[in-house]
Amino acid sequence: MSVREIRVFGDPVLRERATPVEPGSAATAALVQDLLDTVQLPGRAGVAACQIGVAKAAFSFLVDGELGYVLNPRIDEVRGEPELVDEGCLSVPELGFPTPRHPFCRVIGVDTAGDEVVLEGEGLMAQMLQHEMAHLDGKLYLQALEKDMRRLAMAEVRKADWY
């Protein structure tokens, strides 16, 4: 398997709603390995399948030394009033903006064997879970920004060399 190239803002796959994966399939196992390989590069907390060009319901993560993945996830619970946290995205390179995120999040999905996986946490884990789940809904974090910040962010995107 391999580290895959990250798709950037403007790529249509980033706007697609992810479809469920078949947990026991060879294709899913290969996708999971690619996601795990890709998230382990420095500075990465999570990688959704759409970010590597696959509109499937899967993401990998590396938060506080914990490496993992989840398939067919759904948000089970968020707690607390959203707080502004500095956030960036591999698909919107070199930029970051204050993004409203709940301080706690729990996601439930399955692993490649079809066994239940529960991911939950506060801080970076909560932020990552909400960020990656938005990717699976075909949304970038820019869409979660408050109106004035979003306008500023889009102006910065349009000026970026990669755009």
Image: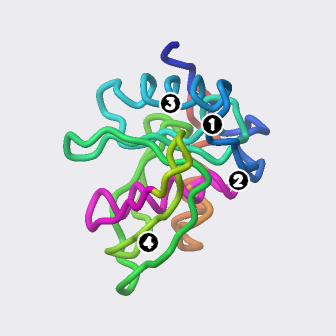
Nearest the camera: 26 or 17? Answer: 26
Residue wearing tag 4: 100
Q: Residues within 10 Å of mark 1 (few under 14, many from 20)?
A: few
Name the image quarter holding residue 24.
top right
> For the residue marked with disc 4, what is the amino acid?
Pro
Residue wearing tag 1: 24
Nearest the camera: 101 or 73? Answer: 73
Residue wearing tag 3: 35
- Judged left or right of residue 51, residue 61 is left
Name the image quarter holding residue 40.
top left
Residue 12 falls within the magenta-colored stretch: no
Residue wearing tag 2: 138
User: What is the quadrant of the C terminus in the image?
Assistant: top right
**Magenta residues, as a range?**
117-140
Instruction: List x then y, in percent, for residue 146.
Output: 53, 73
Question: What SS does tag 4 mark?
Answer: strand
> Which mark lies nearer to you, 2 or 3?
3
- Rounded to the nearest angstrom, the CA distance separating label 4 from label 1 is 36 Å
Name the image quarter holding residue 133.
bottom right
> For the residue marked with disc 3, what is the amino acid?
Leu
> For the residue marked with disc 2, what is the amino acid?
Gly
> Which mark lies nearer to you, 2 or 4?
2
